[in-house]
Amino acid sequence: MKRRMRHVPLALAALALIAVARDAAAHSLDPALLDVREGADGTTLVTWKTSAQRIPGSRTEPVLPPSCRTVRSPEITDEGARITVRWTVDCRPGGLVGQQIGVDGLGLAKIDALVRVILADGRLVRGVVRARDPFLTIPERPRRFDVLRDYIRLGVEHILGGPDHLLFVFGLLLLVITPRLLVRTVTAFTIGHSLTLTAAVFDLVRVPPALAELLISISVLVLAVELARDATQPTLMRRKPWAMAAVFGLLHGLGFAGGLRAIGLPGSDIPVALFAFNVGVEIGQISFIAVVLALRWGLEHVPARWPRWAAWVPVYSIGILAAFWCFERTAALMQ
């Protein structure tokens, strides 16, 4: 029981940080998407996807180069959670290279927008536009530094916007006590999700996104069940938590791959983008662990007497959330 009581400050620290991370990463969770594709016939297909829910009075609109003229009227599709608008423009004779594409109204809407441009020669240019920088310039060739910077940032945003990933890492902090074993366990988790992320990007592994999300929630639930058991029992997961973390890391890597596919990869710099995204995920993960441990240290020095039932709050919180995700994602998979 004393060991479980030590988890109370850790739980408070982690839950507070997850809430902050979710709020800070809210833009990356439901961004608008502007997809622009140059065709072989000289016309350009524009697809604009936004959330059906928006702040009253806000309105976001794509901004295309002045040379682009509409040749096919917009078609609006209501997809429930999102609204999709498609239309065709002609940007000849200059085309899109060297031009600016952006989104107006991001500040009032409090969202970011992902801009993805596929040029006629097959090159992919992408970037995230924000209220303070609402335009993306289409370069002759994307600079590797820009690719590195953007994908590191997207990796950080992806993991901080994923409560299931953060709760799993939090569960590892509850399961493992010694610093050396914690380092081994987190490293094994990193290796696991890096392997499947890389394999999925190069199409060596194919798993439907809905199934991957379900498997991730199951991994969190299994960890919660282990945490609820008698900590003095030498189970395999407690004796070799690094092995469990490596196996479940493989599942979480599938989730990261789904997020990376949704973002898109620059055709000429896939290895750089993949490496940068992985680095971003690790930066976010290590930052989460460091801040949680720092907050725990601070809370442990606050004079407070916790009730005995508080020792079970972190474990049951993880279990209840994981069970909910399992039911929710099973239902989504069956649709």
Image: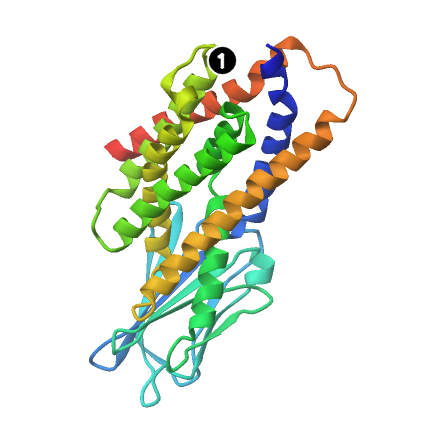
Across and down, in percent, residue 268 comes to 31, 71
Image quarter for residue 189?
top left
Which of the image's four quarters has the C terminus?
A: top left
- Name the one closer to the observer, 241 or 13: 241
Across and down, in percent, residue 225 comes to 42, 17
- Name the one closer to the observer, 105 or 308: 308
Which residue extends farthest right?
A: 303
Across and down, in percent, residue 24 comes to 58, 48
The residue wearing badge 1 is 231
- Residue at the (59%, 32%) spot, across then down: 14
**228 lies above or below 85:** above
Image quarter for residue 178?
top right
- Residue at the (52%, 61%) spot, across then down: 59
Count neighbours of disc 1 (C-alpha within 10 A) and say few if under 14, some if 14 to 19, many if 20 or more: some
Q: Secondary structure at mark 1?
A: loop
**252 lies above or below 303:** below
Answer left or right for 13 relative to 314: right
Answer left or right for 313 relative to 149: right
